[in-house]
Amino acid sequence: MSAPPPLLQRRARGPAVAVVLAVLAVLVAGAVLYVRGALPAAVPVAAGPFTPNDYARALDHVRPGGDLDFVGLGQDRAALERFVASLASVSPRLRPELFPTPQEGLAYWLNAYNALVLRQLLERHPDGVGSAWFGRFYWGHAWPVGGERLTLWALEQRILGEYGDPRVHFALFRGTRGGPSLDGAPYQPEFLDAQLNDASRRFMGNPRHVRLEGDTVHLARLFETRQQDFLAALPEGRGGNVLQFVWAFLPDTCEERPGCDTRGDLDRACGPRLDKCRVTFMPEDLSLPDVADAAARR
């Protein structure tokens, strides 16, 4: 029996190719919805009133310098698991009446993000964030939060971005030694403004993030990736200088953080308009902020 003519072969392959392309389109669309946190999740009955108490217990394992006692956190894992599980039942988007002010909503999302990072780090310990290819740590897992399946990427980009407060970037724990560090307490609505200022000052006062050498200011990569957010917060708007935002949160003295740079240092090096310095951006240290690793390096 002779083979079908080439024209018939091409016609036979046409529907098969169309099916493959359709399946690929569905898969791509599903992946986009997954990463963006646009897929629904079941809402279980809450075990009780929503509180950050279990999360506060997990934060007892944060050391003053920002490193984490992962051994202790693993032993206290049940408290963190309970808090993460409670996120599935309530959120400001699902139950806005429980979070009537922007401060209450923002405190919820900040605590949720940081708790989910901690939960994921426990799963990946001791590999941490650095071994996750192409940033998969932030988009590779979706969590049920208030009726939505949210990745860390979706929480940061789609939800927390709606608040328009650039200080949020210094409050998000990203699981790295070079990124923002955790405080030892949850974010609370009544103290949120002060806590966000403290988080910003901690970040600016760390030489890993801001370091002055002559007329060059070395800044953390975060100042480059989020530069437009920082510039938009300045009175001058987008035409300003990111060093003006840095200056606002630099310490006046380095009594608490020896070796840091101060507002006076920046003024003297860069001039009153902070426009005489060259700015470079430093790569982030992706190592795990594990107190055991810090002790081993001493």
Image (cartoon, helix red, strand yellow):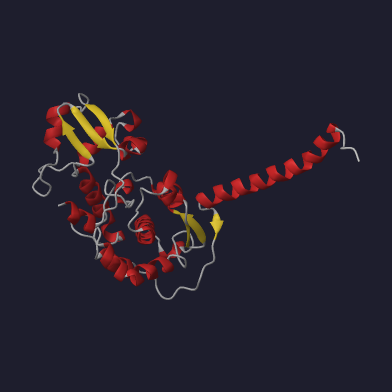
- Quick one: 247 or 134, which is closer to the camera? 134
Q: Choose top left, top right, bottom left or bottom right for residue 66.
A: bottom left
Residue 108 image point, x, y percent:
37, 60
Residue 150 image point, x, y percent:
48, 56
Which residue is most to the top? 276
Decide: is 100 above or below 136. below
- Quick one: 28 or 268, which is closer to the camera? 28
Residue 112 image point, x, y percent:
38, 59
State left or right for residue 23 relative to residue 85.
right
Q: Is residue 193 visible?
A: yes
Which residue is most to the right? 1
Which residue is most to the left? 255
Q: Is residue 67 visible?
A: no
Query: The N terminus is located in which quarter?
Result: top right
Q: Choose top left, top right, bottom left or bottom right for residue 109.
A: bottom left
Decide: is 236 above or below 1. above
Residue 246 image point, x, y percent:
23, 38
State left or right for residue 298 relative to residue 165.
left
The number of discs equals 0
State left or right for residue 108 relative to residue 179.
right
Residue at image location 54% in from the left, 62% down from the top: 41
- Quick one: 13 or 57, which is closer to the camera? 13
Which residue is most to the front? 1
Decide: is 199 above or below 95. above
Residue at image location 67% in from the left, 47% down from the top: 23
Residue at image location 43% in from the left, 68% down from the top: 85
